């Protein structure tokens, strides 16, 4: 199976991290804001487009912080998520993406217990609390939502 490549933004402000809240079939899960890349689109361009769609905000894309890989237990899905540091160039607005209920700010320690997909919240929270997000690879558990 060819993995789906997803770009995501790690946006941290005043001890809070921006998360996209998804509601599907009555279940809520959270993702770092972002999404799939389109044909011939750079990762940075895809991330800017996705933040505009999901949070109605422009952003400056920074350095790559994580490569997060997750595979469904039944091997039906495989994603590779490229997580970039990002800086918002305005306030978060309403989502234009029907899959995203809202983009919301959460305390960093919420990454420890919120249903984050892929499930890399604990590792990211530990790095943020330590004050360091070195570029690194995370093999994350699959979280269905």
Image (cartoon, helix red, strand yellow):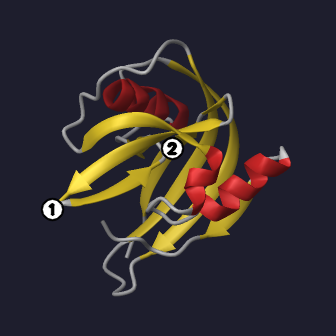
Residue designated by label 1: 25
Is 81 situated left or right of 145 in this image?
right
Residue 134 shows in the view: no
Quarter of the rendering occupied by the C terminus:
bottom left
Residue 122 locus on image (x, y percent):
64, 63
Is 23 situated left or right of 82 in this image?
left
Disc with the residue nearer the chain's start (1 vs 2): 2
Residue 118 shows in the view: yes
31 versus 1 height, above or below: above
Is 111 situated left or right of 128 in this image?
left
Residue 43 locus on image (x, y percent):
52, 38
What label does residue 8 carry, if any? 2
117 versus 21 height, above or below: below
Between marks 1 and 2, how big is the CA–CA gap?
Answer: 23 Å
In the displayed image of the protein, which residue is found farthest to the bottom?
74
In front here: 90 or 51?
90
Total labels: the figure holds 2
Looking at the rendered image, the disc whose residue lies closer to the viewer, 1 or 2, is 1
Residue 17 locus on image (x, y percent):
58, 39
In the displayed image of the protein, which residue is found farthest to the top?
90
- Quadrant in the rendering for residue 107: top right
Q: Residue at x 47, y 15 (%)?
A: 91
Answer whether labels 1 and 2 touch (C-beta < 8 Å).
no
């Amino acid at each position: 199976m060819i993995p789906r490549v997803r770009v995501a933004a790690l946006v941290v402000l005043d001890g809070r991290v921006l998360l996209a809240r998804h509601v599907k079939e009555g279940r809520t899960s959270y993702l770092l804001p972002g999404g799939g890349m389109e044909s011939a689109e750079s990762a940075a361009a895809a991330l800017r487009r996705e933040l505009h769609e999901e949070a109605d905000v422009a952003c400056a894309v920074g350095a790559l912080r994580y490569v997060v890989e997750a595979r469904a237990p039944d091997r039906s899905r495989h994603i590779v998520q490229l997580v970039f540091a990002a800086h918002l160039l305005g306030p978060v607005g309403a989502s234009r993406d029907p899959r995203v209920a809202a983009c919301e700010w959460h305390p960093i320690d919420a990454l420890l217990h919120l249903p984050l997909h892929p499930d890399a919240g604990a590792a990211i929270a530990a790095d943020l609390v330590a004050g360091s997000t070195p570029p690194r690879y995370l093999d994350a558990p699959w979280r269905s939502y």
